C-alpha cells in the first residue's frame, strides 16, 4: 500500500474555494469510474493556505492507471484549470506504508 500526498500552496484567501474545487474534482473522478480512498486536509498551523489531497492506493501501477483515466476526462480538465488558477505552487510526495 502507498500514500500519495498532493500538497498545494494556495493564493492568499483562496483555500476555501480550493477545497470546494477539490471536492468537485473527486466527484468527477467517481463519475469517471475512479474510486480511490481520498481525503482533503487543510493547514492548522504553519504555512497558511495549504491544501493536501491524500490518496491511499495499492501500488504505483494503480496510481498510473487512475491518473491516465482521470486526466483524460474533460470535466476533470475543466475543474483542474479552475483549481490551478488558485494555486501558487504544489508538489507530490509518495510513501510506502510500512506495517
Image (cartoon, helix red, strand yellow):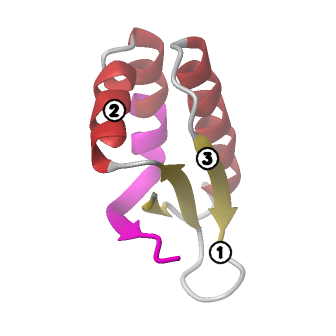
| Cβ atoms under marks 3 and 1 closer than 8 Å | no
Quadrant position of residue 46: bottom right
Residue extent of the magenta highlight? 81-99
| Residue 93 on the magenta span | yes
Residue positioned 61% across, 47% down in the render: 38
Which type of secondary structure does the marked residue at label 1 adopt?
A: loop
Disc 1 vs disc 2: which is toward the camera? 2
Where 8 falls versus 85 (above or below)? Answer: below
Q: Relative to the observer, which residue lies in front, 63 or 54?
A: 63
Residue at 36%, 49% in the rendered image: 59
Give the percent coordinates (x, y) of residue 13: 63, 61
Q: CA distance from mark 2 to mark 3?
A: 14 Å
Q: Is residue 26 left or right of residue 85?
A: right
Front of the two marks 3 and 1: 3
**Residue that numbered label 2 is attached to:** 67
Question: Mark 3 sits on what residue?
Answer: 38
| SS type, badge 2 | helix
Q: How far, Cα to Cα, is label 1 from label 2?
A: 25 Å
Instruction: Tell me if mark 3 has few (under 14), some (14-19) or many (20+) residues whose alpha carbon lies within 10 angstroms of its own.
Output: some
Q: Is residue 89 magenta?
A: yes
Residue 17 spot, x, y in % from top left? 66, 45
In the displayed structure, 83 sits above or below 72; it is below
Can you give x and y, in whole percent of width and height, for residue 28 in the image?
57, 20
Specify which label sits upstream in the sequence, 2 or 3: 3
Crowd rating for badge 1 (residues with CA inside 10 Å; few <14, some 14–19, many 20+): few
Q: Nearer the N terminus, badge 1 or badge 2?
A: 1
Q: Which mark is residue 43?
A: 1
Q: Secondary structure at mark 3?
A: strand
Amino acid at each position: 500500500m502507498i500514500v500519495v500526498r498532493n500538497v498545494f500552496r494556495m493564493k492568499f484567501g483562496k483555500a476555501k474555494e480550493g477545497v470546494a474545487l477539490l471536492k468537485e474534482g473527486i466527484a468527477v473522478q467517481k463519475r469517471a469510474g475512479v474510486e480511490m480512498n481520498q481525503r482533503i486536509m487543510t493547514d492548522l498551523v504553519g504555512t497558511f493556505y495549504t491544501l493536501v489531497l491524500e490518496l491511499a492506493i495499492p501500488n504505483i501501477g494503480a496510481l498510473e492507471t487512475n491518473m491516465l483515466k482521470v486526466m483524460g476526462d474533460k470535466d476533470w480538465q475543466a475543474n483542474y484549470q479552475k483549481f490551478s488558477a488558485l494555486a501558487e505552487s504544489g508538489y507530490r510526495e509518495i510513501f510506502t506504508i510500512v506495517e
